[in-house]
């Protein structure tokens, strides 16, 4: 019986990490700073890796999921970058000084 992907360890970590990934995917699809070829490359690479691992891995063993971690890490990093950029922009708008 397939039990799904085991990523993380605790529910709070999974929720925070999942939120960062969701924001990263949103930034990948919507950010004007990411060029179209880059968007296609990262998006297609992510989809192929995740789909391949999810559909072809019969066991819930961490070593079989290792190829997914660079994808998740990249999307989470993109999410963190987008969150930091928006917080800086918001604080700059409120104070009217500094920031980018």
Image (cartoon, rainbow, N blue to C red):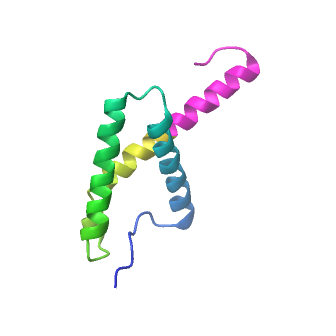
Q: Vertical placement of 76 versus 4: above or below? A: above
Dividing the picture into quarters, in which one does residue 84 lie? top right
Task: Residue 70: give x, y in percent of width and height.
Answer: 31, 49
**Residue 2 figure quarter:** bottom left
**Who's the residue at 36% across and 36% down the image?**
39
Q: Tell me which residue sits at (75%, 19%) in the image.
A: 95
Q: Tell whether 82 sits left or right of 89.
A: left
Please identify the dominant SS of the magenta region: helix
Tell me where residue 14 appears, x and y as whole percent.
51, 61
Residue most toward the bottom? Answer: 1
Horizontal side of residue 21 vs 73, given as left or right = right
Indicate the quadrant where residue 16 lies: bottom right
Q: Position of residue 91 (x, y in %)?
A: 69, 26
Q: Is residue 97 magenta?
A: yes
- The magenta stretch spans which residues? 80-100
Q: Quadrant of the C terminus?
A: top right
Is 89 situated left or right of 27 in this image?
right
Q: Is residue 56 magenta?
A: no
Q: Quadrant of the N terminus?
A: bottom left
Total number of numbered discs in the rendering: 0
In this view, 45 is above or below 82:
below
Residue visible at 38% across and 48% down in the picture: 73
């Amino acid at each position: 019986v397939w039990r799904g992907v085991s990523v993380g360890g605790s529910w709070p970590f999974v929720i925070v990490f999942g939120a960062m990934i969701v924001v990263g995917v949103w930034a990948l699809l919507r950010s004007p700073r990411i060029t179209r070829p880059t968007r296609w490359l990262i998006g297609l690479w992510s989809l192929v890796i995740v789909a391949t691992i999810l559909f072809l891995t019969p066991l819930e063993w961490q070593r079989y999921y290792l190829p997914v971690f660079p994808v998740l890490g990249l999307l989470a990093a993109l999410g963190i970058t987008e969150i930091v950029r928006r917080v800086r922009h918001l604080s700059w708008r409120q104070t009217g000084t500094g920031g980018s």
